[in-house]
Image (spheres, helix red, strand yellow):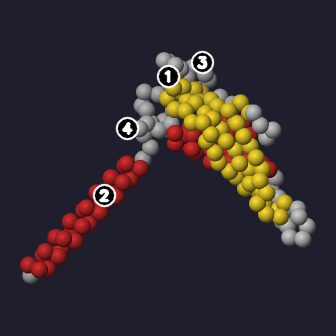
Amino acid sequence: MTHMLTRCLALVLLLITGLSGGCALKYDAGEAFDPEVRTIAVATFENRTFLREIEQDLARALIAEVQKRTPYRITTPAAADTILQGTVVSADRVQLSRVSGVGVPQELELRVAVDFEWRDLRDGNQRASVAGLRDAGRQVATQPAGERLDVARNTVAENLARKIVSEMRSDW
């Protein structure tokens, strides 16, 4: 009987330890944003590349990502506590594959790099800054998919927005 009771207690302890460990991991993995910041302005990034409209795609993706993952409210620079701004510094299309026998590009990858800064407008201090943040999006250029460059551009903008918002987390 004592052997059975010992096994039951060990199982209960194992379950409790496992559950509390799971909760702790979930809590630690959660995103923490500075509660002193209430509002943010998202500026359209400067675009130093020949890739048109990536700066607008990135601005839209950043606004959506900030609204989805942070407690911050989007507003104008005049009314904001902070501003997120940056520059698209490079954009390259790389051919990954071609249609056999024809040489026409089949799959392309759009590689984009940005520099960004998140600045506190109340005191002028820099809250976060990253140079050369990179991501890529793919496009199947041939039929039957026949995707336009917009597909890759939107993918890379959304991926970069996720990375930028992750950089805005508090380190505490």
Q: Is residue 20 left or right of residue 129?
A: left
Residue on which the image places disc 1: 125
Q: Where does label 2 land, which residue? A: 21
Counting residues from the N terminus, which is met first, the one under dot 2 or under dot 4? Answer: 2
Q: What whole-number distance in Å separates the C-alpha atoms at marks 3 and 1?
A: 17 Å
Closer to the chain start, of discs 3 and 2, is 2
Amino acid type of the residue that numbered disc 1 sits on in the rendered structure: Asn
In this view, which residue lies farthest toward the left?
2
Residue at 50% in and 36% down? 168
The quadrant of the rendering that contains the N terminus is: bottom left
| Viewer-side residue, 128 vs 41 | 128
* Amino acid identity at mark 2: Gly
Give percent across and percent down for residue 24. 33, 52
Q: Earlier in the sequence, mark 3 or mark 1?
A: 3
Real-space CA distance between mark 4 and mark 3, rounded to the nearest whole angstrom: 29 Å
- In the image, taking residue 102 as reference, residue 64 lies left or right, namely left
Say whether marks 2 and 4 touch (CB < 8 Å): no
The mark found on residue 172 in the picture is: 4
What crowding class fits label 3: few (fewer than 14 Cα within 10 Å), some (14-19), or many (20 or more)? few
Is residue 140 visible in the rendered structure shown here?
no
Mark 1 → mark 4, Cα distance in angstroms: 18 Å
The nearer-to-camera label among 3 and 1 is: 1
